[in-house]
Image (cartoon, rainbow, N blue to C red):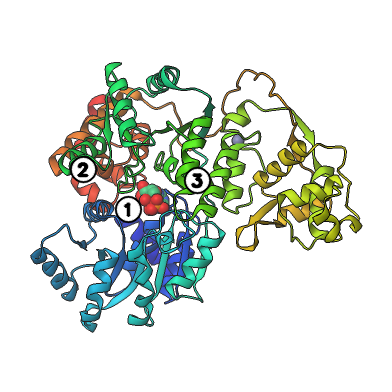
Amino acid sequence: MQDLERKALAVLKKFYGYDTFYPMQYQVIEHVVNGNDAVVLMPTGGGKSLCYQIPALLMPGCSIIVSPLLALMKDQVDALIANGVPAAAINSQQSEQQNRDVLDNVFKQNIKLLYISPERLLADMDQWSKEMLINMIAIDEAHCISHWGHDFRPEYSQLSLVKERFPGVPILALTATADRLTRIDIKEQLNIPDAKIFINSFDRPNISLNVVSGLSGRAKIKRIVSFIEKHHGESGIIYCLSRKSTETMAASLQSLGIDAHAFHAGMSTDIKLRVQQDFINDDLQVICATIAFGMGIDKSNVRWIIHSNMPKNIESYYQEIGRAGRDGMKADALMFYSFGDVKTLMSFAHDSGQAMINVEKLNRMQQYAEATVCRRRILLSYFNERYDHDCGNCDVCNNPPDKIDGTTLCQMALSAMARTQESVGFMTLIDILRGSRKSEIIAKGYDKLKTYGVGHDLTQAMWNAYLLQMLQLGLIYIAYEEDDHLKSTAFGREVLYGKRKIQLSRFYYNLPTKKKPAKSTFPIDVEHDVDEVLLSKLKDVRRALAKAKGIPPYMVFSDKVLTIMAQEKPVTKAQFGTLYGVAEAKTEQYWRQFTTVIKEHI
Ligand code: ADP
Ligand code: ZN
């Protein structure tokens, strides 16, 4: 093992209580400590924070973390301080005096991590002197810099100046949502052409994916209530399309005895803060929110997410469900879908100023909602990730449609694409496969292709459905920057050359009635046979400690750490200190309270 790796592992144990790195974390750390730029793409919960926090702790000087979300900044600073790491923030929520004090401490080299908003960095950075010893600049939520992303922020667009201002200081861009185009854009916009891209799997296998279509009004509420009853006492978020619907949803649930509250941008700051705080502190079970909620919080024990309507694109959907189960324990996502949603969203998309992109993104979302193939496969191929098996933890997998061997069909389509040099879109491809006599087809000479008409015995609707499945399975993708032409992926080429077989869901004009759902086969990494009585006592201790410290319970310890504690039952300080997720600073502060309760219990 290299010296650097040994040091990094020691820091990981001391400040976080973990023994091993998550996939890719160490590679990023090494790359950055050696002075190189990087773009890191990892899903929510993938462990991005450690990718910059550990280099910051390994290098002399101070690391700058650019973040657009003030609440999240505070959260991260609090969590770092709780672990014994000197961190601070500069932003508009603090007084100028506070900001000056922070900067002063940076000069004195008392701060290892400085969180700052982009506008503040851009305004201040020219006045910063050499004594600050800036050793790295991390840019969190880096997709905000791209127009292709779903969350473009104008204040991010000036960040290209950072590289000019700090030549030689490594830049680390991080995001949880990046499709192929956003990825390219981040490098360009940040002026870091040589940055290495680190892509982790975007899979979140612990989140089960479910879609229910066609319910509305009372039937939907009934379904939501029974879902929440199954998640007794567990925190969750219900996303609604409008401010008004968050309020009516919350009122309906309250009237049925559920501990719920609305949250939206139209509420006063005081109330918003209180609702958010209650949720974070496990004092409020359910939040009914517009998408604005959740961006700024790190709560790791959100156990479920409901979308009361279909979201406007897959990026938003994936980011929103990603707020559940960050601690790696089992979580559930449930989405409701109706044609009414599509109509509303379609009119938003048309008025959005970027109608073309947004309508296309909406179409992909709708296809997900109506899918007949494993939903996780669809999501991951949307993010250009290869995932070539069914997940066993979504409603399609648990209630599978009839399958056919689709290898030959896929080969027909892939071969026709190849023979046009991949220069056609969906409709033209279907025309070629079915041997259409349309004048454009003849004019382009497509009727001379060897694959012309090979698929004539399938209807247009059937080809439509099967090509859609090929897209969803990741055999082909749509090149939006090239007139929406279809392109084969590496996986698609393997099928074309006969190296892989492909199963497709049989096309029906009318869907057959569904079979009885099977049980989920998702394996979780923490055993479920924990001592529930002890676990609930430990949660009480956690809650009391959190109240006393003025931090949220999950910041004392995550659900996962408590679950492991309830299994391992440490009774000495030494045993407590070696537990997963227990950092040195926390051993000192908490061992007595937790081990006392454990001893009494046994
Ligand atoms: P992201 O910012 O990518 O959403 P975080 O950095 O918040 O993810 O990490 C998610 C959770 O995983 C946190 O609770 C964090 O403490 C935990 N975590 C990160 N790295 C490790 C690791 N190497 N071992 C165990 N837990 C980790
Ligand atoms: Zn699945």
- Residue, disc 3: 313
Q: Earlier in the sequence, mark 2 or mark 3?
A: 3
Q: Residues within 10 Å of mark 3 (few under 14, many from 20)?
A: many
In this picture, residue 581 sits left or right of residue 148: left
Does dot 1 land on a helix, a strand or a loop? helix
Does dot 2 land on a helix, a strand or a loop? helix
- Residue, disc 2: 590
Give how far across and how far down residue 173 sits, in percent: 42, 65
Give how far across and how far down residue 103 sits, in percent: 16, 71
Give how far across and how far down residue 166 sits, in percent: 34, 80
Amino acid type for the residue under numbered disc 1: Tyr
User: Which of label 3 and label 1 is nearer to you?
Assistant: 3
Amino acid type for the residue under numbered disc 2: Tyr
Which residue is drawn at the image coordinates 18% and 46% (left, top)? 589
- Cα separation, mark 3 vs mark 1, equals 35 Å
Amino acid type for the residue under numbered disc 3: Asn
- Residue, disc 1: 16
Q: Earlier in the sequence, mark 3 or mark 1?
A: 1
Return the residue nearer the eye: 554 or 445: 445
